[in-house]
Amino acid sequence: MQIKRDFYLNQLIDRKHNQMIKIVSGMRRCGKSYLLAELFTRHLLDAGSDKSHIIHIDLDTRDDAKYRNPDVCNEYVKSLLKDDKMYYLLLDEVQLMEDFVSVLNGFLHIKNLDVYVTGSNSRFLSSDIVTEFRGRGDEIRVYPLSLAEIFPLYQGDWQRALDDYALFGGIPLVFTYQKNEDKVKYLKNLLKETYLKDIIERNNIKNSEEFEELLKILASSIGSLVNPKKLEDTFKSVKHVDLTAPTIKQYLDYLQDAFFVSKVLRYNIKGKKYINTPFKCYFTDIGLRNISLDFRQTEETHIMENIIYNELQIRGYNVDVGEVGLGGEKSTEVDFVANLGNKRYYIQSALALPTPEKLAQEEKSLLGIRDGFKKIIITNGNILQTYQDENGITIMSLKEFLLNPNSLDCS
């Protein structure tokens, strides 16, 4: 089975030889290594590069663990440069190397070395791009498989594809299993032995049970507003555990650093300002969210909302939760305010629109926005094609939104 990842592959190809460090970031097991070691390597070979000019080092493996030493890695790479032709360094899980920034900056001075690295922790990468690399780092964020990427596996069966995706998510290796019980077993092992173990050990978390309990609370709260103080009260009243708000905030930071969840702030549309708390959390992979709860809460409404959020992220949008004042102290919510350059979209997620009353309910907050940006309702209900109603609001099917990369610009 081979799933094309042309969206990311083309970004790598466009950045070839740009004299910058190409940083492929994202959560573990989302396909970063496959993108570099398989898809991009195949492109390089097809483009005429010699195999000896492609240097692949995977710091996450035992065989290459010695290259976590920056001096050893530096000398090894330089020893392989035998001529003036272009060489390509593909360095996996770079955050495992001490002082990797100085090593990579040194490689930038080698004119015939094009450098690509992967990493699974934002603290080791995103902040360093701005500071240590002084504008010489170029980040490509990779996400688990989108529904559009897996859809060809289902021979046109949209409902089966959506049902599987909403249940098991988009971690690539999930799709190598045929039986649902094998998918569940894989996700459960992946959550415990890869993600949780990695976060707990990396951040020296003393009480892993409390951390895992917080993860379950967040998983059951997608689509709902949360804040550290409210979560602290929940631990005290329901779990009878004293977990303070500062500790909860720190745990949330750890989950974000691992690209496991995203914290989404509220944005007051009329006042044009952010509201720091409360906020919402969405899971980067819905399958891992579901396995966190042992598949006990698979409500379609919230899962659909999480899937829409992830798709907007994949397409490069900055996404906020919108708040609209309707007069007096009343306010209502817009699920997503999506911004990209000079584009903005206001988006509501609605599982179905069975009656005019339900449509009016979903449109209420959108009609309270007075600017000219596009307003969209995405529904999984049975609509044949995208249309604009008498209020100027675009009604779009979930299928159209997810399978058409240009869907937001369609009339």
Image: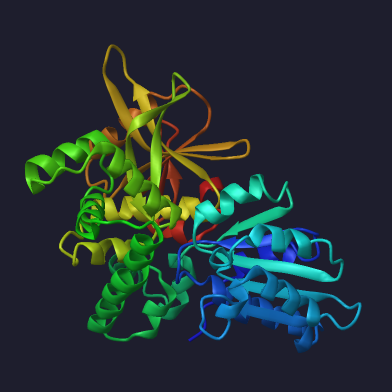
Residue 353 is situated, as x and y percent measured from the top left of the image, at 27, 46
Q: Nearer the viewer, residue 396 or 287?
A: 287
The residue depicted at 28 percent of the width and 45 percent of the height is 223
Image mark count: 0
Q: What's the image's color scheme? A: rainbow
Q: Is residue 179 left or right of residue 389?
A: left
Q: Nearer the viewer, residue 38 or 103?
A: 103
Q: Outermost residue toward the top?
A: 328
Residue 2 seen in render: yes
Q: Check the image and report above or below for 313 versus 199.
A: above
**Foreground residue among 160 and 307:** 307
Q: Residue at x 29, y 76 (%)?
A: 189
Residue 152 locus on image (x, y percent): 47, 77
Residue under the point 52% across and 32% down: 373
Residue 320: image quadrant is top left
Q: Which residue corresponds to the image point at 40% horizontal and 36% vertical from the top-left? A: 265
Relative to the observer, which residue lies in front, 375 or 241?
A: 241
Position in image of residue 96 (x %, y %)? 54, 67
* Whether residue 379 is visible: no
Is 350 left, or right, of 393 in this rendering? left
- State the image quarter where residue 381 is shown: bottom left
Q: Name above or below for residue 117 compared with residue 357.
A: below
| Residue 44 screen position, x and y as percent | 74, 79
Q: Is residue 205 above or below residue 268?
A: below
